[in-house]
Image (tube, rainbow, N blue to C red):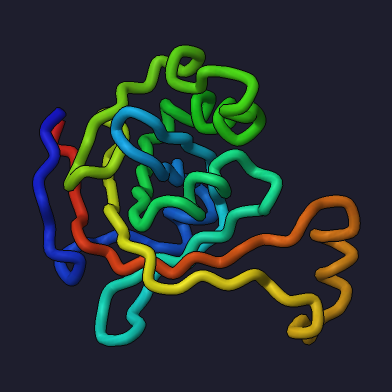
Amino acid sequence: MSFIKKNTEDLVFSPVRMIGKEWFLLTSGTPEDFNTMTCSWGGIGIMWNSSVMTVYVRTSRYTFEYMEKNNFFSISVFPEEYRKALAFCGSHSGRDVDKIKETGLTPVTLDGVPAFAEAKRVFVCEKLYAQMLNTDSFVRKDLLQDYYAKDPMHKMYLGKIIAAYENQA
């Protein structure tokens, strides 16, 4: 592992590509007890004069429990060759399987927060704000049918990026 800490203003990447196409692992917990899940929804930007990331977690996900009880989380973005591992982490629950054992990913700790050595980029975030999505707030009601007819609602977490790393390996 050869992570170099970077200033978020100096990073060059497409957030839309990173989140929607490359996916990422959202990890919350302690180095001794954590869970991770694959995400392809989120955002990155500025809020309250800070660089922030927004992630969304369904209340049914095992990672939700970790997000609720921990104030920090990481976003690990991987090169394409890890797509199979990310697909596994997105389709299996940490309640039922050991995702680390099954994928062969290597946990590391950055600023006290679990992340992964194979990631090309890691964001360490501190939770600033969390709120359940509210059915009354949907302007386009068809989204409720499309995304929530059979699945529970998401909770939104807004996290301040306290550190950004790029893997120089």
Relative depth, front residue between 15 and 115: 115
Q: Residue at x 90, y 65 (%)?
A: 145
In the rendered image, which quarter contains the C terminus?
top left
User: Horizontal placement of 153 versus 103: left or right?
Assistant: right
User: Horizontal placement of 63 versus 115: left or right?
Assistant: right
Image quadrant assignment for residue 96: top right
Q: Residue at x 82, y 60 (%)?
A: 148
Q: Residue at x 48, y 45 (%)?
A: 66
Up the image or down, 137 lies above or below 143; here it is below
Up the image or down, 47 lies above or below 160; here it is below
Relative depth, front residue between 153 and 25: 153
Up the image or down, 133 lies above or below 138; here it is above
Q: Residue at x 21, y 55 (%)?
A: 164
Counting from the top left corner in percent of width and height, residue 140 is at: 81, 81
Counting from the top left corner in percent of width and height, residue 1 is at: 15, 28
Image quadrant assignment for residue 49: bottom left
| Number of on-image labels | 0
Counting from the top left corner in percent of width and height, residue 69 is at: 46, 51
Question: Which residue, as the protein is rendered here, is positioned at the far front?
Answer: 69
Counting from the top left corner in percent of width and height, residue 15 is at: 40, 63
